[in-house]
Amino acid sequence: MPSSVIKYCHYHEDRRVLRVGYQSGAVYDYLEVPEEVYLSMKAAFSKGTFLNRHIKGKYKFRKIA
């Protein structure tokens, strides 16, 4: 199901970085995210809800764009 908040997300396994592009145009890297968390997000019905509950506030991040 398309997300009203998240445009895309990519996981860089070797660096454990989850890059999230938002519908607003903002892009963030979430650091030290385990692959299992990314796979759970990918499988979640609502990616935005998963992001808010399991990633934001739990992992360091940096704004890319």
Image: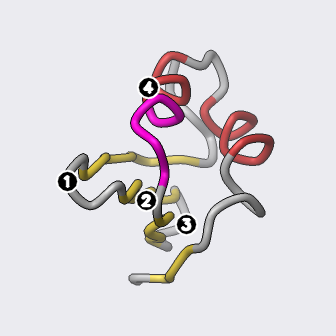
- Between residue 51 and residue 15, name the one nearer to us: 15
Q: Which label lies toward us, 3 or 4? A: 4
Q: Quadrant of the C terminus?
A: bottom left
Q: CA separation, marks 4 and 2?
A: 17 Å
Question: What amino acid is at disc 1?
Answer: Asp
Sequence order check, earlier mark of 3 and 4: 3
Q: Which-is-in-front pick, marks 4 and 2?
A: 4
Point out the frontmost of discs 4 and 1.
1
Mark 1, residue position: 14
Q: In the rendered image, which quarter is residue 35 located in?
A: top left
Q: Is residue 5 left or right of residue 56?
A: left
The span shown in magenta is 33-38
Instruction: Indicate the amino acid at tag 4.
Output: Leu
Q: Which label number is shown at residue 39? A: 4
Q: Main secondary structure of the magenta part?
A: helix
What is the C-alpha distance between the residues marked 3 and 4? 24 Å
Residue 44 in picture, x, y percent from top left = 59, 19
Residue shown at the point (50%, 27%) measured from the top left? 2
Q: CA distance from mark 1 to mark 3?
A: 28 Å
Comparing 51 with 5, the one in front is: 51
Q: In this image, 37 relative to 58: left or right?
A: left
User: x and y percent of residue 52 in the render?
Assistant: 76, 47
Query: Is 24 within the magenta?
Result: no
Q: Position of residue 5 (x, y in %)?
A: 62, 48
Real-space CA distance between mark 1 and mark 2, rounded to the nearest whole angstrom: 19 Å
Task: Tell which tag, 1 or 2, sits nearer the viewer.
Answer: 1
Q: Are discs 2 and 3 less than 8 Å apart at CB? A: no
The numbered dot on residue 24 is: 3
> Is the Cβ of the residue at disc 1 closer than 8 Å to that at disc 3?
no
Which residue is under mark 2?
21
